[in-house]
């Protein structure tokens, strides 16, 4: 590449111009079920990747390779050294230039961005609009399984404390000091739709900023930053606000955190266990 990789977002045009760069590590990080372009039904994300992906991309298994599969909760982050080793196994070393995207839902891509930045690795960006925008613009796709990138030397993790844990969230509920932002849909926030463990509602004192509301419907790109800044400000969030974002499993919340980082907010963390952990204890209160 002739210039450093942007540290937050890259456009489809930028990516198209840099696909051949040998330092690029391009990943589809979609997990769970997803829709292939034009498909009516969801399928396992890896199968969708094999039907259509950006040329040169590899599939990054967020759930099985980049999460602690021994933990009680899905998508629990790995300890720093293990995480750096897992990323190295995927081909991400100290000199890699990483771009990550998802087929539709931004949270899969921003989760990988958040994990890497939490380890002090900032040479990573999210593709604005993901595969949806890429295809809408008539850009080429490839299909079939892809061999992984060669393993790379592990980078040295440097903890950035981008995650919050249960005691820190409980302290925010009991004594304030941080604004809790719920990134789930309005129906989940209100309790109209049940959450993890059959419990409904939100962590007490939370405000609602659904991750889905941060994206434009036309091409799946993020809304303009000035619009997003106004939307967060309308909820009382400024650069001086301590924010802990959460969702069901720490995925969608990373998009809220990512947008705040893009707006220049440094005081934002993601509750890794989110409602999957909070709701597991029936003594933990929920509002609805």
Image (cartoon, helix red, strand yellow):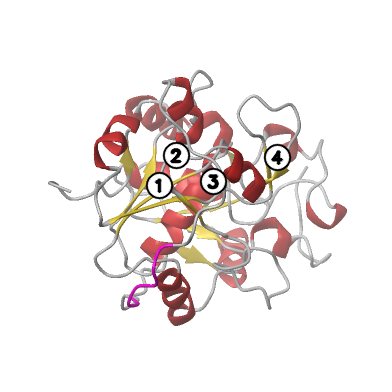
Q: Nearer the viewer, residue 55 or 115?
A: 55
* Tag 1 near tag 3, CB within 8 Å: no
Q: Which mark is residue 107?
A: 3
Q: Earlier in the sequence, mark 2 or mark 4?
A: 2
| Cα gap from disc 3 to disc 4, whole angstroms | 18 Å
Q: Earlier in the sequence, mark 1 or mark 4?
A: 1
| Cα gap from disc 1 to disc 3, whole angstroms | 22 Å
Q: Measured along the vertical axis of the image, is residue 154 above or below residue 8? A: below
Horizontal relation, residue 273 to residue 215: left or right: right
| Cα gap from disc 1 to disc 2, whole angstroms | 6 Å
- Name the spot of residue 67 as percent of width and height, x first: 58, 68
Residue hosting label 4: 189
* Tag 3 near tag 2, CB within 8 Å: no
| Cα gap from disc 1 to disc 4, whole angstroms | 39 Å
| Cα gap from disc 3 to disc 2, whole angstroms | 18 Å
Residue hosting label 1: 56
Residue hosting label 2: 54
Q: Measured along the vertical axis of the image, is residue 82 above or below residue 93? A: below
Q: Residue at x 66, y 46 (%)?
A: 47
| Cα gap from disc 2 to disc 4, whole angstroms | 35 Å
Q: What range is drawn magenta here?
A: 149-154
Give residue 267's quadrant in the image.
bottom left
Q: Quadrant of the C terminus?
A: top right
**Residue 26 painted magenta:** no
């Amino acid at each position: 590449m002739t210039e450093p990789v942007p540290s937050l977002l890259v456009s489809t045009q930028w990516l198209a111009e840099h696909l051949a760069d040998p330092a690029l590590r391009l990943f589809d990080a979609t997990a769970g079920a997803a829709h292939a372009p034009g498909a009516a039904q969801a399928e396992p994300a890896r199968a969708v990747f094999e039907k259509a992906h950006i040329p040169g991309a590899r599939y990054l298994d967020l759930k099985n390779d980049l999460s602690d599969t021994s933990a009680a909760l899905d998508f629990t982050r790995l300890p720093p050294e293990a995480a750096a080793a897992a990323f190295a196994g995927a081909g991400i070393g100290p000199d890699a230039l990483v771009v990550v995207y998802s087929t539709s839902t931004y949270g899969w891509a921003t989760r990988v961005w958040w994990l890497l930045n939490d380890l002090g690795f900032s040479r990573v960006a999210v593709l604005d609009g993901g595969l949806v925008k890429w295809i809408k613009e008539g850009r080429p796709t490839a299909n079939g399984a892809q061999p992984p990138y060669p393993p790379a030397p592990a980078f040295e993790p440097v903890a950035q404390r981008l995650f919050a844990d249960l005691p820190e969230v409980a302290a925010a509920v009991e004594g304030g000091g941080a604004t809790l932002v719920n990134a789930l849909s309005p129906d989940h926030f209100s309790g109209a739709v049940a959450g993890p463990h059959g419990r409904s509602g939100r962590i007490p004192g939370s405000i609602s900023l659904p991750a889905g509301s941060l994206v434009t419907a036309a091409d799946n790109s993020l809304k303009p930053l000035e619009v997003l800044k106004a939307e967060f400000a309308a909820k009382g969030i400024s650069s001086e606000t301590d924010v802990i974002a959460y969702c069901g499993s720490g995925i969608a919340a990373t998009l809220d955190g990512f947008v705040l980082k893009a707006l220049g907010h440094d005081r934002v963390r993601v509750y890794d266990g989110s409602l999957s952990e909070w709701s597991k204890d029936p003594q933990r209160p929920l509002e609805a």
